[in-house]
């Protein structure tokens, strides 16, 4: 569903031009994500059309939006939490960089930028 230019600006301004998830500054081509997923059907309809609202829409960098897809926030959080395991199993480059001390792994909860910003208010 298309978002008007005015609404895009409101969504962009929610987190001062930062991705609501990773916190990176948004660049041209940023996405609008529905925090509570809409979950589109294959026929052009969706399960939750009422979720197409500014209150549910978040500014997102393309990589966060594409990886979140139609997941819930907790599903997305769990996906990110297992990225290190996946890299250790499947990426030779990652394993070599780690051996040479170029990567330090830490264990910590996945906290999204908008959660940090909301805690400050």
Image (cartoon, grey):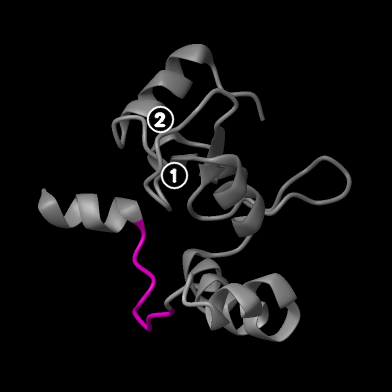
- Identified at 47% across, 77% down, the residue is 101
Residue 59 appears at what percent x and percent y?
45, 37
Measure the alpha-carbon separation of dots 1 and 2: 10 Å
Judge whether residue 51 is colored magenta. Answer: no
Please tell me how many numbered marks the rendered image carries: 2
- Which secondary structure is most common in the magenta stretch? loop
Camera-side residue of 102 and 88: 102
Do callouts 1 and 2 mark residues in contact (Cβ within 8 Å)?
Answer: no
Q: Furthest-right residue in view?
A: 43
- Taking the image as shown, residue 120 lies to the left or right of residue 83, namely left
Camera-side residue of 116 and 7: 116
Residue 12 appears at what percent x and percent y?
40, 28
- Taking the image as shown, residue 57 lies to the left or right of residue 47, namely left
- Taking the image as shown, residue 48 lies to the left or right of residue 42, namely left
- Identified at 45% across, 21% down, the residue is 7
Instruction: Please name which of the two marks, 1 or 2, marks the residue nearer to the observer.
Output: 2
Q: Earlier in the sequence, mark 1 or mark 2?
A: 2
- Identified at 38% across, 40% down, the residue is 55
Say what secondary structure mark 2 lies in.
Answer: helix
Residue 27 appears at what percent x and percent y?
50, 28
Quadrant holding the N terminus:
top right
Judge whether residue 106 is colored magenta. Answer: yes
Q: Furthest-top residue in view?
A: 5
From what the image shows, is residue 100 above or below residue 24? below
Q: Which residues are magenta?
A: 105-112
Which disc, if any, is residue 11?
Answer: 2
From what the image shows, is residue 37 above or below residue 18? below
Residue 36 appears at what percent x and percent y?
50, 55
Q: Which residue is mark 1?
A: 56
- Identified at 87% across, 49% down, the residue is 42
Say what secondary structure mark 1 lies in.
Answer: helix
């Amino acid at each position: 569903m298309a978002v008007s230019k005015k609404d895009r600006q409101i969504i962009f301004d929610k987190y001062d031009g930062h991705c609501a998830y990773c916190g990176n500054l948004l660049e041209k081509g940023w996405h609008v994500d529905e925090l509570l997923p809409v979950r589109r059907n294959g026929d052009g309809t969706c399960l939750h059309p009422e979720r197409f609202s500014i209150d549910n829409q978040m500014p997102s960098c393309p990589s966060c939006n594409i990886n979140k897809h139609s997941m819930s926030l907790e599903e997305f959080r769990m996906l990110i939490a297992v990225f290190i395991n996946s890299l250790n199993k499947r990426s030779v480059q990652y394993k070599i960089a780690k051996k040479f001390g170029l990567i330090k792994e830490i264990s910590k909860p996945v906290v999204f930028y908008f959660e940090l910003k909301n805690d400050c208010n």
